[in-house]
Image: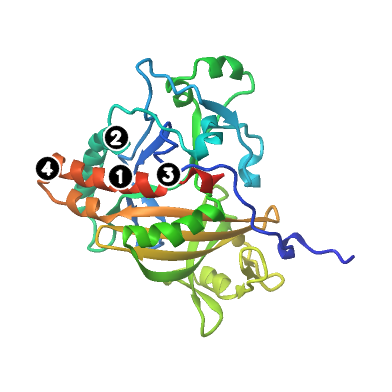
Amino acid sequence: MAYVPPHRRHSKEPEMPLLTPELLAPQFKKNLNVKPYYKSKVDENIVYAHHSTHGWCAIPLDDENQFPSSVNLEPVTLESAELNVGENHLALINTGLDNEGGEVKWNLPRSPWESITENVLEDLLLAFKHARSEMKSAKPKEAYPTLIARVGKVLFRRSPSVNMESIRKNLCAEIPRQWRQLFYTNTPVSYKEKIVNEVVPKIGVDFEEEEDIYDVQLSDSTSPDSTLFCRCLVMKEHGKLQLCENDEMQSITDLINSAILDPDLKGGLRWPPGKESSGDKYRVVRFTHVIVNTYRNTSLRLKVKHYDRFDLRTLTGEASWGISLMLENVVSKLQEENVEASTISEILKEDMQLIWDNFLSCERFLS
């Protein structure tokens, strides 16, 4: 049998392990990342504001700050080879989902979306206050704030010395809060199909566009600690890549232009022999083919993304799906100078209820 290099090997897209969306699930664990960010029109990279706020909270808990007895911290194995190296990941798993047809009913003191809104509102208002101030000094259309809800699963990293049996007997919100956290956004194909086929028509968002994007990561031999990210669009008439913005460095432009589109390879790109670098300075180290389908209505944008990655350093590649929602109605109000907190609260509650009812109550599709 002829040897097939890793870059040309094919494999079926794997079903991901049990994943639950942000703010979820099912009704026992939430990760709230309040991060206004600016999207630069120059390099298309995300730049986080100086006043970004991170928070993690669990909803709901009992009077003693304990999780329900059916919820445990359990080891999980990730499909991502990069994340599995040297890591011991745990996730909050609800074993009660194995019974009662995949649903667990609890008597909550108030609705989950009210609790979520209360937890994030103060940080959200403060973050956008800083954002408005910084935008006044920015050039027109150079940057704009957004608020994104991403679907994923919160993972925790623990030391092998931790006694898991002891934790399982007395699991409270403070235990995982003390550990390092990772927000894992890969979602299964079954969940993506559920969203596209059922949720999209239900919530009234219309298909807007499909984008075909390549993100190319370059190393710089003169600055080993830095990495350059180039976002490229496909010129279908020429079958070539084009930088989203003209780059001042001709060597980078030439490197991008020499890429060859090849859908049969992981990552969807290849370079002619010896052309993966530009002289002794820039070298391609990683690239990702991203297909983005956008659905939109007057208050939000839903993005369904397929990622196909390949790393030339490790000769490994992987594919995954990602789901995110841009809460445009909230952002529009937050940019007003004298908006009432009660107004933001009501709009946010509506968005959180929509997310909870349509994106977080799909447990059987996430296993």
Q: Earlier in the sequence, mark 3 or mark 4?
A: 4
Disc 2 designates what residue? 111
Q: Earlier in the sequence, mark 4 or mark 2?
A: 2
Q: Does 242 sit above or below residue 125?
A: below
Disc 1 designates what residue? 353
- Structural crowding at the residue carrying mark 3, measured as other residues with C-alpha within 10 Å and reported as few (<14), some (14–19) or many (≥20): some
User: Which residue is depicted at the point 48% across and 25% down?
Assistant: 176
Q: Earlier in the sequence, mark 2 or mark 3?
A: 2
Disc 4 designates what residue? 340
Disc 3 designates what residue? 361
Q: Is residue 323 left or right of residue 205?
A: right
Discs 2, 1 touching: Cβ within 8 Å: yes
Residue 34: name its quadrant: top left
Q: Earlier in the sequence, mark 4 or mark 1?
A: 4
Residue 8 position, x and y percent, is 73, 65
Q: Residue furthest right?
A: 1
Residue at disc 1, secondary structure: helix
